Image (cartoon, rainbow, N blue to C red):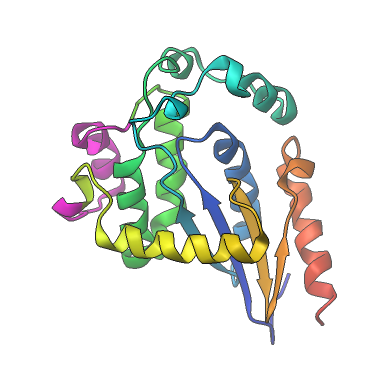
């Protein structure tokens, strides 16, 4: 599968503590495997700040719907954390750093963070929560990543996210967008949650329109 003579980029706006983002990430995995030439942008929206009541994910806030549409069952380890405030600030800083400094490893890191959170129940809320992940992936993020506030790099990326959300006229996450030359295509990820590989044909169809 080729993207020759085309400028093709894939934008994934997400929060790695968001259940919907968790079930959409396999689509990103499939696209990048099928189309390695597509430039990937993993943009963490830093939705969960650990403060407001809206940042407490409950079973009544759509988790059952995620399980039904994606045909999965969330782990008991994760469900035990649902009555606690959710804070993705450190994850946003870490993923922004990885996207800029280690883009070839960023998707692996995202998958690892989501596995830790949704399968192991790791809240990823303090620096020590990341120690095993950092050791396993052999990465060395700077100290500023683990300050419990959004750093300047993350804030700059958030401005880019806000600008893109204005263009697509939605602030909903996750959002999966394919940019081919000057055209921006919002992919409906709900169609592919139970069969992630099927999104490959959808992307190829869009590429064929431009060749």
In the displayed structure, 18 sits above or below 29; it is above
- Identity of the residue drawn at 78% across and 48% down: 198
- The N terminus lies in which quarter of the figure? bottom right
- Identity of the residue drawn at 59% across and 63% down: 166
- Closest to the observer, 10 or 132: 10
Residue 133 visible at all: yes
- Identity of the residue drawn at 80% across and 68% down: 206
Query: Residue 159: horizontal and vertical position, in percent?
Result: 43, 64
In the displayed structure, 84 sits above or below 169; it is above
- The C terminus lies in which quarter of the figure? bottom right
In the displayed structure, 136 sits above or below 160; it is above
Query: Residue 98: horizontal and vertical position, in percent?
Result: 34, 58
- Closest to the observer, 198 or 170: 170
Query: Residue 86: horizontal and vertical position, in percent?
Result: 38, 29
State which quadrant residue 97 falls in: bottom left
| Part of the protein shown in magenta | 124-144
């Amino acid at each position: 599968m080729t993207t020759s003579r085309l400028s093709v980029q894939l934008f994934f706006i997400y929060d790695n503590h968001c259940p919907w983002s968790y079930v959409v990430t396999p689509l990103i995995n499939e696209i990048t495997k099928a189309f390695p030439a597509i430039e990937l942008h993993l943009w963490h929206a830093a939705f969960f700040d650990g403060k407001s009541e809206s940042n407490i994910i409950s079973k009544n806030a759509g988790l059952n719907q995620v399980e039904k549409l994606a045909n999965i069952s969330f782990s008991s380890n994760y469900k035990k954390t649902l009555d606690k405030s959710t804070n993705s600030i450190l994850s946003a800083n870490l993923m922004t750093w990885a996207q800029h400094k280690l883009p070839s490893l960023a998707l692996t890191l995202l998958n690892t963070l989501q596995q830790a959170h949704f399968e192991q129940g790791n809240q990823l809320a303090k620096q020590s929560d990341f120690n095993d992940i950092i050791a396993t992936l052999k990465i060395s993020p700077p100290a500023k990543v683990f300050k419990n506030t959004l750093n300047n790099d993350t804030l700059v990326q958030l401005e880019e996210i806000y600008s893109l959300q204005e263009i697509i006229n939605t602030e909903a996450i996750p959002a999966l967008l394919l940019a081919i030359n000057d055209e921006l295509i919002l992919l409906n990820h709900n169609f592919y949650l139970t069969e992630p590989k099927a999104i490959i044909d959808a992307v190829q169809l869009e590429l064929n329109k431009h060749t």
